[in-house]
Amino acid sequence: MSTHTPVDTLRGSLAQVRTEVGKAVVGQDGAVTGLIIALLARGHVLLEGVPGVAKTLLVRSLSHSLSLETKRVQFTPDLMPGDVTGSLVYDARVGDFEFRKGPVFTNILLADEINRTPPKTQSALLEAMEERQVSVDGRSLPLPDPFIVAATMNPIEYEGTYTLPEAQLDRFLLKLVLDVPERDAEFEVLRRHAEGFNPRDLAGAGVTAVLGAEELKTAQAAVASVGASPDVLAYIVDLARATRSSPSVKLGVSPRGTTALLAAAKAWAWVSGYDSITPDHVQAMVLPVWRHRVQLRPEAELEGVSVDAILRAVLAQVQVPI
């Protein structure tokens, strides 16, 4: 007789999601896991990588395997807030304005090259990310649940881009870096295309829906109930404080950053089959959760110091609770 609980079944289904996404996307397992953790922790994700490393395909195939709706917005310098959130349109038949919902009314919004749009449009997206609602004409319209933003940034081109405000960067739970795949993975991509793989036909690639929004909500509730001992909480605080006192750092991790690390560590612990988080779960999530929250001093940047290197140094120097 099976002793699997519904939560164990959910965990198994989420592991199957990785397999389904792998039918369409090769060599980005870490990014797939990161997106699943973000969904479980109800957080948004920054995806950084050069063009052509399957960022869009990754989000589309994940949505497909979770039966979630996804919409894509190409961020450009002339994009207006209403192009994202929706706008009031005059309806001549009823002689009044009606609200036409924008692409933000979806489960996973793929914001392509988010740093190409002006601050005004970015701030409209910020309200949606933080409040999970859109304000129109004095009314607040709730966004679908679940709702996350997966925003891509091109790390190479800076011409015609706008720096994301610190407040907005802080709203992203994770920053995932998608590297160019290894030789074997790149060969596998090419082999699939040679055999007729069509990235626009996910069903044809064999990607099937494993679970839906309701099961995902159950999993989110299970993640929220994962425990954390005072020792582990103190460890997170000590790590954050160490980033603030690093000589290369201008701006260290904020208290919002510590709560984000706790949320991500809970999700990773739950996915790994634990009832409470351990220092290992915290350490595993430090780089993706904090790499976009630390600002370096200009002289450290000139010397080629990286945020990831500083975070690794912090992990090495802060005492781990036994």
Image (cartoon, rainbow, N blue to C red):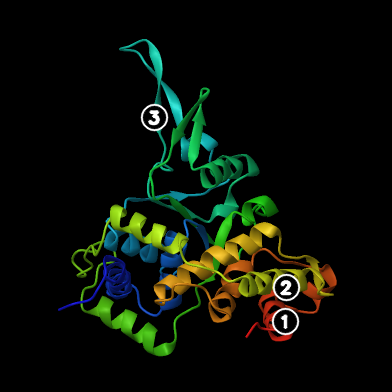
Marks 3/2: CA distance? 47 Å
| Whether label 3 touches label 1, CB < 8 Å | no
Q: Amino acid at mark 1?
A: Val
| Whether label 3 touches label 2, CB < 8 Å | no
At x 53%, y 42%, the residue is 131
Find residue 259 and report its image quarter.
bottom right
Q: How many marks?
A: 3
- Asked whether residue 155 appears in the rendered view, the answer is no
At x 54%, y 78%, the residue is 278
- What numbered label is drawn on residue 318? 1
Q: Nearer the viewer, residue 300 or 32?
A: 32
Q: Position of residue 75 (x, y in %)?
A: 51, 49
Q: Amino acid at mark 3?
A: Arg
At x 24%, y 72%, the residue is 197
Determine which residue is flagged by label 2: 238
Q: Amino acid at mark 2?
A: Asp
Q: Is residue 54 found left or right of 44 in the rendered image?
A: left
Determine which residue is flagged by label 3: 100
Q: Position of residue 104 (x, y in %)?
A: 43, 43
Secondary structure category for the residue under label 3: strand
